[in-house]
Image (spheres, grey):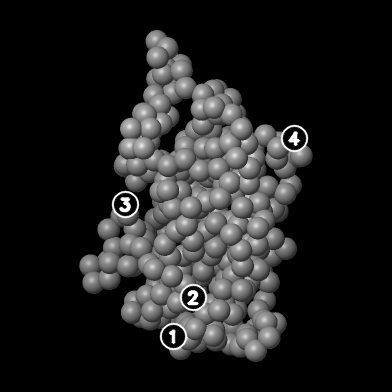
Amino acid sequence: MATATNAPAFDVLPMSGSLGAEVRGISLEHAGPTEAEAILSLLIEHMVLFFPDQHLTPDAHIAFGRHFGDLEGHPNVQGTSEHSEIFELRASRGAVADEWHSDLTCQDQPSVLAILNMVKCPAVGGDTMWANMVKAYDALSRPLQDLCEGLTALHDAHPHGQPEKMSIHPVVRVHPVTRRKSLFVNEHFTRRIVELSHEESDLLLGHLTRWASNPSFTVRYSWAQGTIAMWDNRCTQHYVLDDFEEERVIQRVTVMGDQPEAASPARFEPFTNSGAPGASGRHDRQLKAYLDAKAQAR
Ligand SMILES: O=C(O)CCC(=O)C(=O)O
């Protein structure tokens, strides 16, 4: 049961040792501010929540999302025609969000949380996994934690066909509510560690993004039609299993972002060698272009 004083009591069933809980005994369609506050505390505790048997209409989905802040349509992907706040993923043979990611880290203010409504799901397959980035950070060795805390990374919207959309974020961020540190790089959007040479960046980023999906940090959820899932995008990543052959339709509303707070100030200068002829210059060009544009905008 949820425990906050005077908070509504829901049935809460943890789904793994790392993160995730199924919540029953609430109708999200009828949730008001008191329920929303209790749900938010549960979300902070469990990082991802699953609410089976909700069957929300798009309007009810949007209304539920608005309890948690302003909603944003997907900046790079079209919403459904009637509801600009809803972003729909429709697939019938896998290939949907099958790379680990936190949402929209290519933006300066990646989303705070998101709420999915499973509209139509295959009889088998198409599960979604989430991973706990606080655990991923905590389980790094002390020297690697120390190195990562002084670094930042360039993220871009290349997977959405817009590589010119970029942002730089700390590699380790602090959660604004819990103050816990979490690893904040992902295989989908993170392109480059700013302060390392591209070869060093490839090695470290490769290690960190593989590490982030270590099975012991994860929960895997098998959907049923009408289930709502909600996750804290500031300290988790997620991934859809590409193993289905029937239609899968899922809709998302997304709560607007905040600026990620660094665990420590950046300790090193950006590494760019873009003037160099040949390959090394080419590898640094994207980072240099971003830094130059930022400097000009100041
Ligand atoms: O379809 C899913 O289960 C997850 C979709 C997803 O990756 C996203 O909304 O960012």
How much space separates mark 1 and mark 4, taking CA atoms?
48 Å
How much space separates mark 1 and mark 2, taking CA atoms?
12 Å
Residue at left 56%, top 50%? 261
Nearer-N-terminus badge (1/2): 1
- Callout 1–callout 3 Cβ contact below 8 Å: no
Do we see residue 111 in this rendering? no
Q: Tell me the element at label 1.
A: helix
How much space separates mark 3 and mark 4, taking CA atoms?
37 Å
Badge 2 is on which residue?
227
How much space separates mark 2 and mark 4, taking CA atoms?
42 Å
Badge 4 is on which residue?
143
Nearer-N-terminus badge (1/3): 1
* Residue 30 shown left or right of residue 141 in the figure: left
Badge 1 is on which residue?
29
Nearer-N-terminus badge (1/4): 1
Residue at left 61%, top 88%? 8
Task: Determine which of the numbered discs, if any, sits on residue 76 in the image.
Answer: 3
In percent of width and height, residue 196 lies at 56, 26
Nearer-N-terminus badge (3/4): 3
User: Callout 1: few (<14), some (14-19), or many (20+) C-alpha neighbours within 10 Å?
Assistant: some
